[in-house]
Image: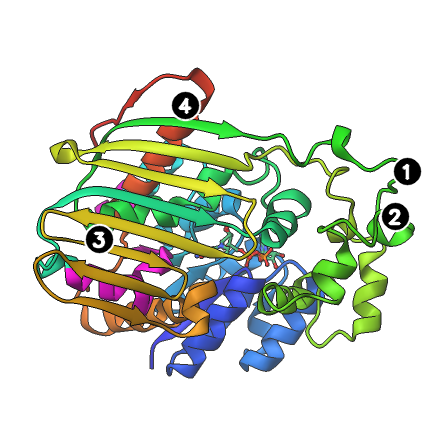
Amino acid sequence: MTTIAIIGLGSRGYMYARHLKAQGAKIVSICEKKQTLLETSAKTLGVDPSKAFLDEKDFFAQGKIADAMVIATQDRDHYGHAKQALELGYHILCEKPVSPIKEQCEELNELALSKNLYMVVCHVLRYTAFYDTIKKIIDCGLIGDITCVNLVENIGYYHFAHSYVRGNWRREDETGPSILAKCCHDLDMIYYLTGKKAKTVYSAGYRKAFLPENAPEGAPSHCLSGCPEENTCPYHVDRIYLSPKKNSFPFMFVKRRLICEKPGATRKEFKEKLKTSPYGRCVYKCDNDVMENQVVSLKLEGDIPATLNMTCHSNRIYRHTRISGTKGEIVGEGGKFRLNIFAGPKKTYKFSLLEAIGHASGDKNIVKDFLELLRTNEVAPRLSLMKDTMESHLIAFAAEESRKTNKIIEMPEY
Ligand SMILES: NC(=O)c1ccc[n+]([C@@H]2O[C@H](COP(=O)([O-])OP(=O)(O)OC[C@H]3O[C@@H](n4cnc5c(N)ncnc54)[C@H](O)[C@@H]3O)[C@@H](O)[C@H]2O)c1
C-alpha cells in the first residue's frame, strides 16, 4: 500500500487526503498548524494521533516515513517544505504556485532532478475531462496546426472578493501576484495544449475597484456591523456567504469549514464568526494589493500569438477557451466546447456541472496519476513535473516584470 505524509490540511490538503484515501493510499502522518483542523483531520483520516503534528519541525524530524509527501501549505511556504522533503528523499505532490520567487523555483527544479525524485505540481486543469478532451483533439490533428490561442479566466466577483480581497491571496508580499496565484493554470494550459514555449511576454494590469475611496459612506469595517449598503452591495457577506445565490452556492458552501476553522459549523456559528473574521470585512476596507484585471500577450515558438485575460468582474467562475488552427477551431465556455472543423463536422462536447465551475475532476485525477506514477515509475504525459511547471511560472514572472516596466520581456532559457 502506498503511504503518504501531508503538510497543510486546509481546503486543498484535506481534499487530496480524502482522494488519496479513497484511492487506496494510507495517510501515515500529517502536519497542520491549526489545532482543531489537525485533530479533526487525524480523526477522519484515521491517522495515529502520535503521527499528527502541529509543528513542522517535529513532522520533518521523523525523517522519511512514507513513499511521498503532499505539500498543501500556503504559496510562500512551499519552497521550504518542498526543499526539506526532497532532501529527505520524498517524491512530492506540491500545490501551485510553487513559489513567487523565480530562484526558488529554479532551485527546487534542480534539486528534484539531481535527486531523481518526482516533484509533481498541481496544475490540476490538465486532468479535467474538459481539457483532456481538447488536448486529445489537438494532438490527433483535427484542427490542424495551431495558429492562435485566447484564454479568459473569469474569476467570479464573489470568488475574487473571498480569496483576493478578503482572503489568503490578497497581498503580494504574503502569497504572490494574482497572475501567478490564479492563472499559472491557464499559462500552463497554453504550453500544455500547444507544446510551444513563450518567446516574448507583454502584460498590462488594472486595480481600481477594491480601494478605500470606493467604500460607501458610513460603511463599517465589517459588513455585519450595520452597513448602510447591505441591501445593494454585491459583496455583502450575507449575500456571499450566508444566503448565496445559485451561481455562488457550491463555491461558498465549502468555505464554511475554512472560515470557521472546523467542519460542520452551524449557520449561526458561521454568522457569528463573520462578525469579526477577515472574511467578514468590507471589501473596500481590506489590505489587498493584487491585480484585479490583467492581460498577458505572448509570442510562442513559431511566432504563434496567445493571450490570457484574467478578470475579477464576472458573474460566474468559468474559463473561456478559444484555440484556432489551420483546419478548425475549438471554442469553449464553462462546461462545454464546440469543435468546428472547417471542412468537416461540427460537434458540441458537454461536461458535468463540476467541470463547469472548477476542477473537481482534475483534483481526483491528479491523485490517480500521482499514485500510478509512484507504483509504476511511468510518467504519464499529462503529469506536470517541476521541469514542465517552470514554463507557467516563468511566464507569470515575466508578465509581472512587463506590467511594472511596460516593456516586452524576452523569456529566459532554462
Ligand atoms: N491547484 C489548485 O487549483 C489550487 C486551488 C486553490 C489553492 N491552491 C493552492 O493550494 C495551497 C493551499 O491552499 P488552500 O486553499 O488549501 O489554503 P488553506 O489556507 O485552506 O490551507 C493551508 C493550510 O496549511 C496550514 N499551514 C500553513 N503553514 C503550515 C505549516 N508551516 N505547518 C503546518 N500547517 C501549515 C494552514 O494552517 C492551512 O490550514 C496554496 O498554495 C494555494 O495557492 C491550489
Regarding mark 2 in the picture, which secondary structure is present there?
Answer: loop
| Distance from the alpha carbon under mark 4 to that under mark 2 | 39 Å
- What residue range appears in magenta? 110-137
Label 3: element kind? loop
Could you tell me how far apart the alpha carbons at marks 2 and 1 are, in whole angstroms?
7 Å
Q: Earlier in the sequence, mark 1 or mark 4?
A: 1
Q: Position of residue 248 (x, y in %)?
A: 61, 63
Q: Determine whether, in the image, residue 95 is placed left or right of residue 281.
A: left
Observer-side mark, 4 or 2, equals: 2
Is residue 59 shown to the viewer in this render?
Answer: yes
Mark 1 and 4 residues: CB-CB less than 8 Å, in contact?
A: no
Which residue type carries mark 4? Glu
Which residue is depicted at the point 45% across and 42% down? 310
Query: Toward the viewer: 50 or 20?
Result: 20
Report the colour scheme: rainbow
Q: Are marks 4 and 2 in contact (CB under 8 Å)?
A: no
Tell me which residue sits at (70%, 70%) in the image. Answer: 262
Classify 10 Å Cα crowding around label 3: few (below 14), some (14-19), many (20 and above): few
Q: CA distance from mark 3 to mark 1?
A: 59 Å
Image depth: mark 1 or mark 4 in front: 1
Query: Picture quarter containing residue 371?
Result: bottom left
- Earlier along the polypeptide chain: callout 4 or callout 3? 3
Q: Which residue is mark 1?
A: 218
Please name the residue that numbered disc 2 is placed on.
Answer: 227
Q: In the rendered image, which residue does mark 3 sit on?
A: 116
- Residue 69, quarter of the rendered image: bottom left
Reading the image, the residue beneath label 4 is 401
